[in-house]
Image: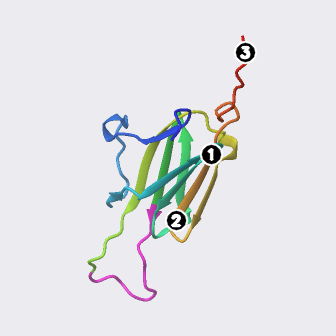
Amino acid sequence: MSPETNLTQKPEAQQGTQVEATRARPICLPCTDIYERGDELLVIAEMPGVSRDAADVSLEAGELRIAGRVERATVDGHQLAYTEYETGDYERTFRITGDIDADHIDAVMKNGILRIVLPKSKQASPQKISVKAG
C-alpha cells in the first residue's frame, strides 16, 4: 500500500473502552482482503449468514468498523431440542491513515460477502509533480 493511505487492523489493546455484549454469542473476526489502487481502497470481508439489514459499516475518527449479526435459523412449527452448530456475530476494526471521501463510500452485501469501496479524497490521491530545471 502507498504511504498516503494505509489500512491496518486496530490492535485489541488500543480499542479503548470496553463495551458489554448484549448477546451471549461468540464474536468472530471476518476474513478480510484489502486492495488498493490509485483512487480507492477495496475491502472484502466474508461474513456468512449476515443479511444486508444485519450488516453495519461505519467510519469515524479514522476507524473503519465492520460488524454483522447472524440470526439463528429456525424451522417453522419446531422447537430446537439439540444443537451442535453454533453461529456467531462478526466484528472487526481497521485504522485508516489518509483522507477518505466519506460521502462516497459504497458498501454492498451479497451472498455473505461484504464489499466496501473507500474512495480517496482528491487531496489524498497520488499526483504527478513535474520537476523544473533551476
The foreground one among 70 and 20 is 70
Residue 106 percent across, percent down from the top left: 65, 52
Which of the 4 image quarters holds residue 25?
Answer: bottom left
List the residue tagged with mark 3: 133
Residue 108 percent across, percent down from the top left: 61, 60
Q: Residue at x 53, y 59 (%)?
A: 55
Write down the region rendered in magenta.
69-82
State whether residue 55 is above or below residue 81. Answer: above
Residue 19 percent across, percent down from the top left: 37, 43
125 magenta-colored: no
Give how far apart the Cα atoms at labels 1 and 2 are: 19 Å
76 magenta-colored: yes
Q: Residue at x 35, y 39 (%)?
A: 11
Q: Work out which residue is located at the far front of the displayed protein and give it.
A: 133
Label drawn at residue 40:
1
On screen, residue 54 versus residue 28, left or right, reads right
Which numbered disc, 1 or 2, marks the residue that appears first in the sequence?
1
Residue type of the residue flagged with mark 3: Ala
List the residue tagged with mark 2: 113
Q: Label 1's element?
A: strand
